[in-house]
Amino acid sequence: MQVIATAGHVDHGKSTLVRALTGMEPDRWAEERRRGMTIDLGYAWTTLPSGIELAFVDVPGHQRFVTNMLAGVGPAAAALFVVAADEGWRRQSGEHLDALNALGIRQGLLVVTRSDLADPRPVLADAGQRLAATSLGAVEGLAVSGRTGTGLDELRQALDRLVARLGVPDPGGRIRLWIDRSFSVRGSGTVVTGTLGAGSIAVGDELQLRDQRVRVRGLQQLGRPADRVHGVARVAVNLRSIDTAQVRRGDALLTRDAWHWTAVVDARLEPILFDPPAELTVHVGSASVPARVRMLSADLARLTLRTRLPLQFGDRLILRDPAQQCIVAGALVLDADPPDFDRRGAAQLRAAELDALDPADAVDPGGIATQVRRRQAVRRQTLVALGLPVAEPAGVLVRQDWLIDQPTWLRWQRELTHTVDEYAAAHPQQPGLPLEKARQRIGVPDPALLRLLTRESGLELAAGRVARPGVEVSLGAAEGAVQELEARLSKHCFDAPERTQLEGYGLTSRDLATAERAGRLLRLAPDIVVGPNAAELAAAVLAGLPQPFTTSQARQALDTTRRIAVPLLEHLDRLGLTARIDASTRAIVSVPQR
């Protein structure tokens, strides 16, 4: 299936043409049919001679409803541009073409309607030249009459040729369904519609709507129920547990936790039709958001949106001046997570950095290296959420799911070694620098990353502390008792003795603290002592459970009691090995390399 949008001046026959091609009434509202003009978005579909299903988004042509028109054109990959033979090119023809050009749409057809009322050839020539000067380039042009049916068969053949050039998106891609309509159906609840550009949605899927999780209760494609829908498609999605009043045009249904929400983007303006004002409206998908513009150079700008949106590298935006009622520019997002301007001259440096990127190259390895260098270290999924390819250019190290700037990694190694030695000199009775303190001092973003850094720096990590190899702490008279306790815990790491049993060993709180610093014990609480490798062993065991898991499931898997399981899980939370999902469940975040 493919989806294309109509475009053209009011009353030039867009809806009549769609009606003639599909046999369906695209105008949804009685007022539209009464006034003979499209006010809001209409939808209709047909099967082409090739057997491909094609859906039309019929947009309003009247100047007062340009915002509605942009909501329909935004998610479409191609356009059916309509000009009437008896009227020729008009004002809204130009603004609709400006919108397509701003979006960088490269596929379309020119259709001159009402060819039974005037010679279509002059309009075909004039409109064809205008379209050729935009991103559409030279497009096929046809003359038709919706009233007599002349040229409709040829148009259907041309539509077949057009959709054959559009390609098929990745069915496994991330979902971003811009919502253009929401309503309530008795007995079913909230339904939203939109154009699914990529990915697939199935009944039962859990998606994200702003900061809320929603579940798909039902699907329709072209008016028919479906269990799963693949992009490209016009789709209606029935959602559970959300009221219609909570959904608005411009919201997006998203793959959960797979998109970067931002209110600031750096973009290249292309084309620039008028000098952008400082305040304008940004249109993307079906959304329209007020924004401030800060020009960084002649064609680079920082856009600060009033509302956060799920945006990525390569997104096309329309910048419109609502005061002058005109499109001023298109914008190509170059960075959806740009750096702050925190010092004098930062804007000029940023402009030079962006200008060095090739906007036509979406897999620029230099661009990835720049992104990694700026962040020092970044997770793969963060780059994916920003719409960037997960390349591994020169100067970038890969550690688990992290991409790390190589000079940064080497600096971290030097700083870690120096910090460990400095701590050892200041605390001779301590077995090493606490792991979290080391992470904070050096600035490593993740405890798991610091563990890898420790090993590659030739240091040792035991009981949550980093030290030079061979560092020992003497326990003096408590040595024998600690050895007895170690023998017990070596048989079952989580077999913490009861308080009375612990007192029987004759170990004071100070003795236990010293033994813990030496990496020989781990205290989860003053009177709960487990083996020193309890965290690593527990994480490995819990990783084998279905995720997420409950405290009871963890207790059974670890073969211990609730007295021990609860503080042990809280200890794993503090180490970043587990994370709470809600009040009763957790999930493994990472498992330490042993």
Image: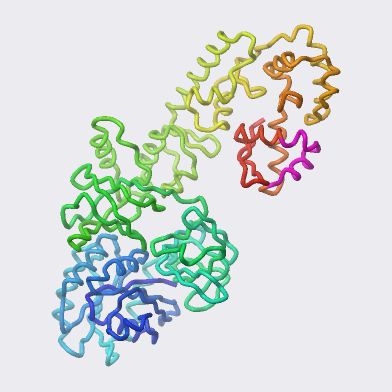
The answer to whether residue 140 is seen in the rendering is: no
Camera-side residue of 463 and 210: 210
Which image quadrant is residue 133 in?
bottom left
Which image quadrant is residue 52 in?
bottom left
In the rendered image, the vertical position of residue 144 relative to residue 226, given as above or below: below
Q: Position of residue 268 (x, y in %)?
A: 26, 49
Quick check: 271 left or right of 198? left
Quick check: 206 left or right of 30? right
Q: Residue at x 48, y 18 (%)?
A: 414
Camera-side residue of 507 and 297: 507
Which image quadrant is residue 373 in?
top left
Give the extent of the magenta segment.
549-566
Q: Position of residue 350 (x, y in %)?
A: 28, 37
Q: Position of residue 224 (x, y in %)?
A: 52, 78
In the rendered image, the vertical position of residue 155 relative to residue 560, given as above or below: below
Secondary structure mostly seen in magenta is: helix
Q: Residue at x 56, y 70 (%)?
A: 218
